[in-house]
Image (cartoon, coloured by chain):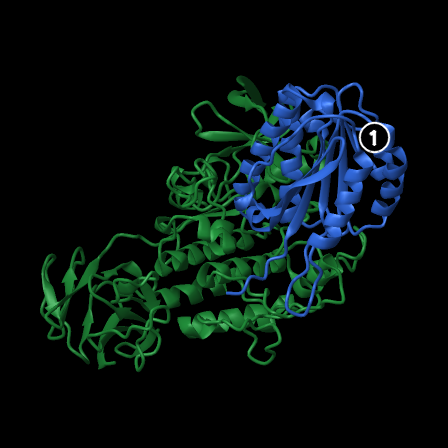
Amino acid sequence: MADFNRRLPVYLLIDCSGSMRGERIEAVKQGIRSLVAELRSDPQALETAYLSVITFSSTAKQVEKLTELMLFEEPEFVTEGATMFGRALQLLIDCINTEVRKSTETQKGDWKPLVFILTDGSPSDIPDFKRCAEILKNMPIANIVACAAGADAKTEYLKMITDNVLMMNSLSAGDMAKFFAWVSSSIKMTSNKVDLNKGIVIPPADSNGFQFVE
Amino acid sequence: MSRIAEAILRDGTKLPYVVTDNPPSGTMKHTYFSPDKSYVVQFFNDADMGRNMYTRDRISAIIGKYNPTVPEEKGGAKGNTKKLAEYFSGLFCWPVEIVVAPEFGIVCPAYPQNYFFDENSANVSGLNLKGKDKKSRWFTSSVRKYLNNAEFGNFKSMLKISILLARAVRRMHSAGLAHSDLSGNNVLIDPKTGGCVVIDIDSLVVPGIYPPEVAGTKGYIAPEVVDSAKYPYGDKRRCQPCIETDLHSMAVLIYEYLFKRHPLEGKMRFPQFEAEEEDNLLMGKYALFIENPDDTRNRPDDLIIKVSDFGEYVEKLCLQAFVDGLHDPKKRPTAMDWERGLIKTWEMLYPCENRECGAEWFILYDEKNPVCPYCHSRIKSRQIVKFLFKKEINGRKGQWVQYGETVVYDKMPLYAWHVYSDIFDDEKADRDEIAYIVKNNDKWFLVNKKANGMRSEDGRIIPIGESVLLKNGDFFRISENNNGSLIEVSIRQG
């Protein structure tokens, strides 16, 4: 049987600046491990969701190319330096342009991607950031969810990228687990359900203990 | 970290449940288990659902007067006996109680252990399925490749699951209820034992009570619902989930169980549209059966097993569901049509003689060509034995008419529905074996296990434990009681 599956590309943009060092990045790693395990155990997510990780610090790097869940391997997270958030957005744009498949006569095109961003600071490269935020607005993306974690995270920049900005007060392992559990249910819901009007369904965040910023 | 909390029911009863971080959650609800795992307490993700009066009324009706898993005398559905309630308890995970505090929720029985994967279910490292429920989707989609072979059962068990699903849906529909979100996630199956259980009953559409806005699950939504979703909620042109849309979802599931592929996912494309829009056309307005005999645009190049390989009933039902009824909901076969047609198909099951054949069973519908469509092996004995069942025409003593038949194989059991013309293979029938077939040195025998008054061709009584040789053209009765069928033996060289 030919493979007629559409893929659901999921991009995780993870802040790896110096301030994320230690417990924080460990909590992120654990979160991604549970996310992958959780998605693998949902047949429809396992079938459709493809995962990529982009990290940003003094530079931006796609540490895991868009990969099917069973082949996903935990990337290395090197925490150092500044928060080149703009470069990460530029890389995201490039990745979406090259990795997300369009429909052809013989191949089903991918679903529009989901993007989850986690940062504990604000961009060091504000002009780049603003330029890329503008480009992103016109990209074929189903949804971008940005999470501002910790006291120093600036939601005003995240608001330039998306209306879906989450606030998390701490970066404790428990909060991070909740965040990734929520990301997992968003992905599961997108791969299983269709809200035929909006095209995408996002679960409410309040039951998970954090809130969207108005 | 977990702790014990208490759910308070309408009558004040307190039920303990274990609160965990990140409980298992679906699109509508999240679930906590009781300390002994015998029941679950479920709360709505959207707490407003529970504050809604319609939701409460609907769920009270589902738990009470529409409940086929509780006998009438205990507050269940009208006419429901203890025996029927027990039978349907096995096919549904039906809510049993309403939780009023700490917030609105429901209590459901936990499903039996065989609907959970164990540590040996997956065949790849990195996939831990232990304790995860056996959603149908695991067995019918491309992720099958990650499951251990021992999980798959065989063709017979998949056909049994199809019959049970049709029966469960028929039971809901006969009460006017529509499930509204039947899908590969909401029907759990155990191919090893041939069982199925319908879950997420709380989104049922109850007659006269405002229906919920269920988003539906990709691949299982009826084409008219997909296509009319462009109209806003409340618009009259927007099609709502109902019994007819269930009939589409159910047909997709049964097709997936029997053929391990989706009936509408073929090679047709509309590449000029974005994925989301293209999908809406392929599953909605322009949905086309991959096996449509008159329009082959959607037919995959590698279609090996076809609807015609499982005999006339499956073929007719599939064409009715996915050709005639695909865009014309009134023409879809009912759940009762599916149940009856699949049971007639069941009576043509034959064990494949090739020990390597993964399907193990096939449908012997063509006596001239008794070949397993999976492994292409032909039955060796070349001898095909059938029982033709006849009943006496009302008011005309001694005149018999044929009403059914079954293909006979070695060690085949015979049940009440083979013995009596007024008993149908359904939830009411007694499931004890009455007689069975034995094949010995190319001779076929019928052994009496518990029938009183079984007689041979020449009128001799066959006592319990004894057998009778079957010859072509023989007529005999297994029971002399009223409605005892007259059985004609047909033995042909295949």
The part of the image, by quadrant, that contains residue B453 is bottom left
Q: Looking at the picture, how far across and down is residue B113, in whole percent?
A: 39, 37
Q: Which of A51 and B173 is in front in this view?
A: A51
Q: Is residue B393 left or right of residue B459?
A: right
Q: Looking at the picture, how far across and down is residue B74, in whole percent?
A: 47, 35
- Please count the marks in the image: 1
In the rendering, what colour is chain A?
blue
Rendered residue at 43%/58% (across/down): B163
| B230 is higher (above) or lower (below) than A183 | below
Q: Is residue B166 left or right of residue B347?
A: right
| B22 is higher (above) or lower (below) than B347 | above
Q: Residues within 10 Å of mark 1 (few under 14, many from 20)?
A: many
Q: Mark 1 lies on which chain?
A: A
Q: What residue type is labelled 1?
A: Pro
Q: Give the residue number, with chain letter if any, for mark 1.
A: A123
Let me know if residue B275 appears in the view: yes
Rendered residue at 78%/47% (across/down): A93
Q: Looking at the picture, how far across and down is residue B225, in whole percent?
A: 70, 58
| B91 is higher (above) or lower (below) than B307 | above
- Chain letter, green: B
Instruction: Indicate the quadrant containing the N terminus of chain B: top left, top right, bottom left or bottom right.
Output: top right
| B56 is higher (above) or lower (below) than B368 | above
The part of the image, by quadrant, that contains residue A202 is top right
Rendered residue at 66%/22% (across/down): A24
Let me know if residue B44 appears in the view: no
Rendered residue at 48%/25% (across/down): B34
Q: Which of B363 and B416 is in front in this view?
A: B363
Q: SS at mark 1? A: loop
Q: Looking at the picture, how far across and down is residue A2, in whole percent?
A: 54, 65
Instruction: Indicate the quadrant containing the C terminus of chain B: top left, top right, bottom left or bottom right.
Output: bottom left
